[in-house]
């Protein structure tokens, strides 16, 4: 175990949840300092000294500071999960790396637009066209995941890895939304396996009311 790992960010923030899920999987002792949203503090000089962009999550591990959620995932995986959650072989590791990038650049923008539009934004303020577009893209992305998962239990192969965290972290929110969902049995099975993990329950399945902030 590491000593002195600190995570800045509110526990209900999606990008922070990804990091805390991994921290839990790795069994790392850590402290969470809640900033952002209703906690404020992102514009304080001491926080900006950690991350000049004023965003969460940020971690400090001993003397090392890392920001940007997927950079944090890669750092923690390489430092504490090599050979387990972070494959040692570069070719095997690249498969998971691809899913991290895809989740961040394709799935997450569409899904977060959908979630915030339906769950956070008051009904009379919603952009219906943007919601329809986000729903269509989200459905397409999940259908792709469903096809990929037809031949394996996890995104990068036969075992859980960091590859599963960014896309998998969206599903608790997705299944909580009141909307028509396509029947994607492989996706549902994958979510069921992820939901059985203790760290997922602790860090991702937060009370829904918290997720409005």
Image: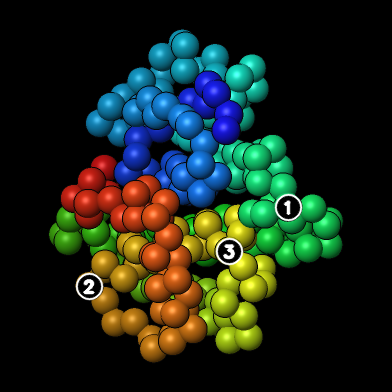
Separation of disc 3 and disc 2 at Cα? 29 Å
Q: Nearer the viewer, residue 83 or 131?
A: 83
User: Residue 90's spot in the image, x, y percent?
Assistant: 83, 56
Q: Is residue 176 above or below residue 97?
A: below
Q: Which mark is residue 160?
A: 3
Farthest-out residue, top: 45
Give the residue pinned by disc 2: 178
Q: Residue at x 19, y 50 (%)?
A: 209
| Alpha carbon separation for disc pair 1 and 3 | 12 Å
Residue at the spot 17% in from the left edge and 61% down from the top edge: 123
| Residue annotated with mark 1 | 83
- Position of residue 50 in the picture relative to residue 36 (left or right): right
Disc 2 to disc 1, C-alpha distance: 40 Å
Between 80 and 39, the one nearer to me in the picture: 80
The crowding category of the residue bearing disc 3, from other C-alpha atoms within 10 Å (few below 14, some 14 to 19, many at least 20), is some
SS type, badge 3: loop
Whole-percent x, y for residue 102 in the image = 62, 62
Q: Earlier in the sequence, mark 2 or mark 1?
A: 1
User: Can residue 181 be seen by looking at this rendering?
Assistant: yes
Label 2's element? Answer: loop
Is 137 on the left or on the right of 201, as rendered?
A: right
Q: How many marks?
A: 3
Element carrying mark 1? loop
Point out the tag, 3 or 2, that comes first from the N-terminus: 3
- The answer to whether residue 105 is seen in the rendering is no
The answer to whether 56 is drawn above or below residue 175 in the figure is above
């Amino acid at each position: 175990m590491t000593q002195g790992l600190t995570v800045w960010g509110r526990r209900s923030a999606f990008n922070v949840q990804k990091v805390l899920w991994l921290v839990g999987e790795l069994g790392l002792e850590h402290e969470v300092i809640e900033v952002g949203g209703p906690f404020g503090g992102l514009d304080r000089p001491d926080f900006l000294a950690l991350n000049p962009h004023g965003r969460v999550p940020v971690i400090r591990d001993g003397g090392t500071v890392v920001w940007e959620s997927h950079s944090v995932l890669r750092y923690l995986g390489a430092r504490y999960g090599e050979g387990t959650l972070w494959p040692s072989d570069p070719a095997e590791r690249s498969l998971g790396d691809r899913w991290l990038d895809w989740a961040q650049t394709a799935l997450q923008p569409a899904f977060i637009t959908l979630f915030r539009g339906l769950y956070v934004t008051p009904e009379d303020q919603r952009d219906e066209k943007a919601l329809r577009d986000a729903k269509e893209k989200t459905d397409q992305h999940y259908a792709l995941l469903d096809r990929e998962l037809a031949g394996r239990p996890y995104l990068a192969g036969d075992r859980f890895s960091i590859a599963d965290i960014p896309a998998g972290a969206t599903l608790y929110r997705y299944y909580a939304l009141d909307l028509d969902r396509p029947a994607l049995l492989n996706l549902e099975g994958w979510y069921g396996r992820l939901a059985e993990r203790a760290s997922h329950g602790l860090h991702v399945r937060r009370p829904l009311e918290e997720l409005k902030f």
